[in-house]
Amino acid sequence: MVTLYYGYFSNGVTGSRHLIKSAETDREESWTLTHNAYGKPLISGGPEISISHTKGAAAVVVSSRPAGVDIERIRSVLPILPKRVMSHKEYQWFDKEGKSEEAFFTLWTLKESYYKYLGTGLPGFPNQTNFYRECGTWHLEGSQLVFSVFRAKEYVIALCSEDHEIRIIQQEEN
């Protein structure tokens, strides 16, 4: 099972720290966080973890298997950016969705969550992926990974994991 913690905070970095502490408390564990060469957070002898924050919000995923999470506030983007970061198929979907900011950040967070799952970091312009939606579910061409996308207020959260079972815990700033 994957546990997704998310919430709204005046500072996203502080919020992610709050969510990590909540996850530690829930699991009755104490963690020491380190990072691999690409910046992926690691817990020595503990579960897998992925962390994301943006202006006003944060998300943390904890799992027994690798997982990745990304959260982004929906906002305007430079008009050139979608063509640079999307594959041809992804851009076709984006175009059918009216080139909306929400559609852009849906694809962007899917890509970020996937590369966080891999632990490699985002490779420049990630236009080699082919995410597509089928029967209400997001898929990555050539992959059996599980992708989930959530809309929370003015944010999009994407989760990449090997598990279908997701527990979601929303937290607020104290």
Image: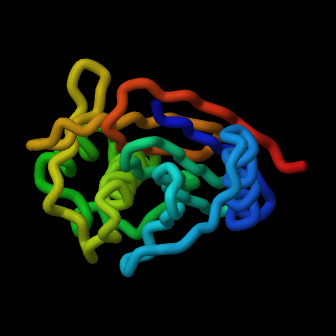
Q: Is residue 168 above or below residue 98?
A: above
Q: Is residue 92 above or below residue 138?
A: below
* Nearest the eye: 115 or 99: 115
State which quadrant residue 73 falls in. bottom right
Residue at x-position 41% and y-position 75%? 36
The picture places residue 39, in percent across and down from the top left corner, at: 44, 75
Residue at x-position 65% and y-position 39%? 153
Residue extending furthest toward the right: 174
Is 41 left, or right, of 25 in this rendering? left
Residue at x-position 24% and y-position 19%? 135
The picture places residue 30, in percent across and down from the top left corner, at: 70, 56
* Nearest the eye: 117 or 88: 117
Counting labels gives 0
Residue extending furthest toward the bottom: 37
* Nearest the eye: 87 or 5: 5
The picture places residue 148, in percent across and down from the top left corner, at: 39, 34
Is 156 left, or right, of 54 in this rendering? left
Is 170 left, or right, of 110 in this rendering? right
Residue at x-position 38% and y-position 60%? 116
Residue extending furthest toward the front: 45
Is 106 left, or right, of 24 in this rendering? left
